[in-house]
Image: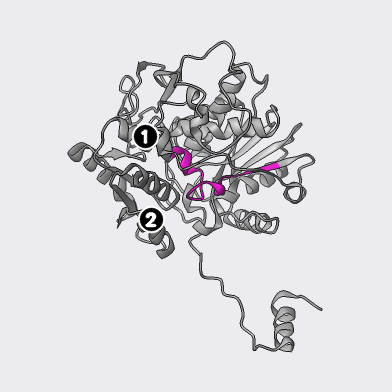
Amino acid sequence: MSNGESRAIGLRCLSCGDTSPLDPSQFLGCRACLSEKFQSPLDVIYDYPESGESLLPDTALPGLFRYAPLLPPLVEELSLAEGGTPLVSAPELASWAGLDGKLFVKDESRNPTWSHKDRFAYLTIGAALQVKAPAVIVSSTGNHGAATAAYAAKAGLPCVVLSPPDCPPAVQSFLLAYGAAVVRIPYDSAWTLIADAVHRTGWYPASTFTPSPTGPPYGTEGYKTIAYEVWLQLDGRTPAAVFVPTGYAELFYGVWKGFRELRDLGLTDSTPVMVACEPAARGALARALDAGMSIATVPPDPTIAYSIATTVNGYRGVVVLEQSGGFPVSVTDEEMAEAQTQMAQTGLWAEASAAASVAGLRRALANGFESEGPVVCISTSSGFKERSLGEAEAPEAEPTWDNVEDVLMRRYGIVL
């Protein structure tokens, strides 16, 4: 059941503050401060009540429609029971990272298509339905495309996914299974093609395509529910810090906004320090901060964290760091791979991009970060999304116990 109607009333520019009516088709960003070099994202604004006690459910169960008053208008029947993901206590990971305190992992791989992107897609496809778009189009390396394809299928909307040339066969199969039209194209062509589709056909863009990332305004709102759930799962407490894998910073901003709303609604008196975890091979947000810029670009150096391997930062990330007193942290491929291994050995199998948060925590602690309360790491997606999926191969043995025992000892070090 929904807790009520949406209290969303308009859109506000994150840079200049200009406001406009609530309109899901305003995916090009703010027009008031538009320039050749910068386009600011639009943020949904709400008519907040004095107290938020009646706006949130008692428990963090699946279905984002439970948070309807604090989200843009929803299409409830579009839900695939997204959200309600577990907050896993991780003392072994805390010890490995060097944290002298409690660590929790918010495991977003438990969503319908195994990533946090389902929260975004639920709101975005709902927006496409509201504007009566004939189809949706998205550029994706995997997670975003899968989520968009699944919700488009539920909505009965045609879905076009532009994927990179090296999109793994397993990911292509995943996308095609939802009935999406998947086309592999060069990396640097996607945004131009999405713009052509939007202007020529009226298709709804489910991902950003502007020179400085803006993205559809409704999608990011879905990520706020992660903060609501963490707060509920911690029995009304706010974590001291939240570590988030960061590319265009839509997830980063959404989680921060959710905690900020909890404070503004009087449900908590504190907000967490927000930490953006970027691949060291890219690090556009860190570059922007170092240069005192809103937007920075970086070379497309290779990294295993392909889901967050952006060459330009999103302005939302700059806003979060300014408002939360947070900071970016860069993690190497080796650090992410090690964190990925450690997570799997505690029962959490994540893709490398998702493990960036745990790697980022360890790196931040090594750099002198201290926490006086619980820390939450967002694990964004499943290890099934890894590009190397299927490359590992288990050894064979002749069907006698002596042979099996020999393999166990030689391959795995198991001595019986």
**In the image as oriented, which residue stretches furthest toward the front?**
1
Q: Work out whether 399 lies above or below 5.
A: below
The quadrant in which residue 340 appears is bottom right
Percent of width and height locating residue 247? 48, 42
Tell me the element at label 1: helix
Q: Foreground: 140 or 119?
A: 119
The quadrant in which residue 72 appears is top left
From where the camera sits, is residue 331 visible?
Answer: no
Which badge, 1 or 2, is on the more N-terminal residue?
Answer: 1
Which residue is labeled 1 in the image?
126
Tell me what residue is drawn at x 57 percent, y 56 percent: 333
Which residue is labeled 2 in the image?
175
Tell me what residue is drawn at x 65 percent, y 29 percent: 272
In front: label 1 or label 2: 1
The quadrant in which residue 209 appears is top left
**In the image as oriented, which residue stretches furthest toward the right?**
416
Where are the magenta residues, as a range? 104-120
Tell me what residue is drawn at x 74 percent, y 83 percent: 405
- Quarter holding the C terminus is bottom right
In the image, taking residue 153 as reference, residue 59 lies left or right, namely right
User: Counting other residues with Cα less than 10 Å from the Cα at mark 2, is it few (<14), some (14-19), or many (20 or more)?
Assistant: many
Tell me the element at label 2: helix
Residue contact between numbered discs 1 and 2, judged by CB atoms under 8 Å = no
The amino acid on which the numbered mark 1 sits, given as a three-letter code, is Gly
The amino acid on which the numbered mark 2 sits, given as a three-letter code, is Leu
- What label sits on residue 364 in the rendered view? none
The colour scheme used here is one colour
In the image, taking residue 351 as reference, residue 37 lies left or right, namely left
